[in-house]
Amino acid sequence: MMVCDGYVSDETMGTIAPVVVYWVYAGVYQILSLYLDKFRFHSLHEEHKKNVVPIITVVKGVLLQQLLQVAITQLGFVITSYGEETLKPTVQPPVSIQILQILLAMFIFDTCQYFVHRYMHHNKFLYRHVHSHHHRLIVPYAVGALYNHPVEVITDMLGGAAAFFATGMTPRTSVWFFCLATVKTNRRSLRSTASGERVPRFVQQ
């Protein structure tokens, strides 16, 4: 177990940081959607009219998923630290190795998500009872990128765990990986659902 700058352990940071990143990143887009309606692909009126579930339900669902995410992440760190000398600091590999680990982890994670998502659409039972939960948002909210059925939450987390274990990254490196994966998930959700804002250049600068 290592301590980040003498305050919190890497394991704690790797657990909490992705949650904070998610709400900050998605929250900015959610707030922008209220003031930049003319730049949206779908208006606020369409958002309220077409969505099957209200935003408060989505927020509760995401918080539930993140609670499960925290539990699984902590379990993963416990498994990796089992049998290790807790007083012995973990040696970080060179930055180049960490970058390679993160890139490989992204590939593994994306591959897992791709095939699971594809199978969810091909299997009628899983689509109807599991994956359709995600598609209740016809015009998804920015904070709804992680609004999924609990079963799909677990499959996503298993993909992340597989990437973490397969690359052998340290808890500190995993902080960067899981935060980047969180941002990428938000970006993909906003882009693929065509619900994001076409933000004008002066806002992007």
Image: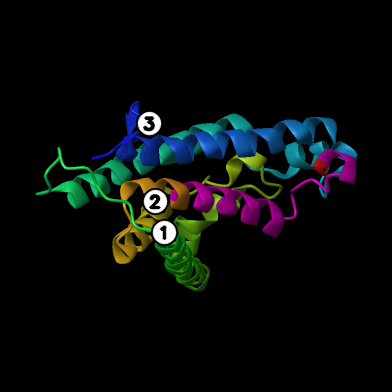
Mark 3 surroundings: few (<14), some (14-19) or many (≥20) residues within 10 A: few
Q: Please, which residue is most extreme toward the top here?
A: 7
Mark 2 surroundings: few (<14), some (14-19) or many (≥20) residues within 10 A: many
Q: Earlier in the sequence, mark 3 or mark 1?
A: 3
The image position of residue 46, as x and y in percent, is: 80, 42
Question: What's the amino acid at mark 1?
Answer: Gln
Residue 50: quarter of image: top right
Question: What's the amino acid at mark 3?
Answer: Asp
From the viewer's perspective, is residue 49 above or below residue 156?
A: above
Which residue is depicted at the point 69% across and 34% down?
Answer: 28
From the viewer's perspective, is residue 93 above or below residue 24?
A: below
Q: Earlier in the sequence, mark 1 or mark 2?
A: 1
Question: What's the amino acid at mark 2?
Answer: Thr
The kind of secondary structure element at disc 3 is loop
From the viewer's perspective, is residue 39 above or below residue 8?
A: below
Q: Mark on residue 182?
A: none
**According to the image, label 3 marks what residue?**
5
The image position of residue 36, as x and y in percent, is: 85, 36
Nearer the camera: disc 3 or disc 2: 3
Q: Mark on residue 98?
A: 1
Q: Earlier in the sequence, mark 3 or mark 2?
A: 3
Q: Is residue 189 magenta?
A: yes
Evaluate whether residue 54 shows in this view. no
Evaluate whether residue 114 shows in this view. yes
**According to the image, label 2 marks what residue?**
173
Tell me if label 1 and label 2 are in contact, CB under 8 Å. yes
Q: Which residues are magenta?
A: 178-203
The image position of residue 151, as x and y in percent, is: 38, 53
